[in-house]
Amino acid sequence: MNIRITGRHIRIPESVRNYAQQKVLKLPRIYDNIQEIEVIVDNDKNGNSSVEMIARLEHHRSHVVKSVAESSYKGIDMTVHKLENHLRKVKGKERENKHTEETY
């Protein structure tokens, strides 16, 4: 799994970069077909931090999750939580479609 952490209009401190990487590395426990995750951190004029995560899965599927918080750490936590829930739904749908009962 490739991880790219970038800042939009800001320079990301090494501590935030390490924190994001630690959180993202836990995602394959939920859904193991993740090819790449891109984390984009941006600060707005009000001092809020927006975090966007783009998860690219097998078969060229990608899922985008965004959140806005007071700090980069909270934004990363919120975004990872949203992405975890989204990946659980995707996995559940795949499992549901795989194990359907055929009735005649």
Image: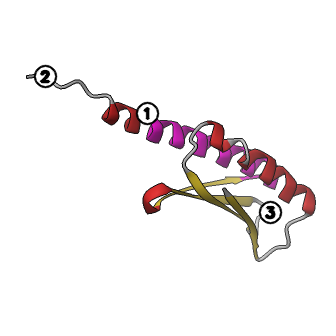
Mark drawn on residue 92: 1
What secondary structure is marked by label 2? loop
Instruction: Specify which label sits upstream in the sequence, 1 or 2.
Output: 1
92 horizontally vs 56: left or right: left
- Whether residue 71 is visible here, answered yes or no, is no
Q: Residues within 10 Å of mark 2 (few under 14, many from 20)?
A: few
Residue mark closest to the camera, 2 vs 3: 2
In the picture of the structure, the residue carrying the numbered disc 3 is 47
Q: Nearer the viewer, mark 3 or mark 1?
A: 1
Dot 2 corresponds to which residue?
Answer: 103
Q: Which of marks 3 and 1 is nearer the N terminus?
A: 3
Q: Tag 3 or tag 2, which sits nearer the N-term?
A: 3
Secondary structure, mark 3, is: loop
Q: Residues within 10 Å of mark 3 (few under 14, many from 20)?
A: few
Q: Which residues lie in the magenta part?
A: 69-91
At x 27% / y 28%, what residue is drawn? 100
Residue 16 in the image: above or below residue 40: above
Residue 91 locus on image (x, y percent): 46, 38
Badge 2 amino acid? Thr
> Which residue occupies 62% across, 60% down?
36
Confirm whether residue 38 shows in the render: yes
Which secondary structure class fits the magenta region best? helix
At a point 64% along the width and 43% down the height, the residue shown is 28
Does residue 90 show up magenta in the picture? yes
Closer mark to the observer between disc 1 and disc 2 = 2
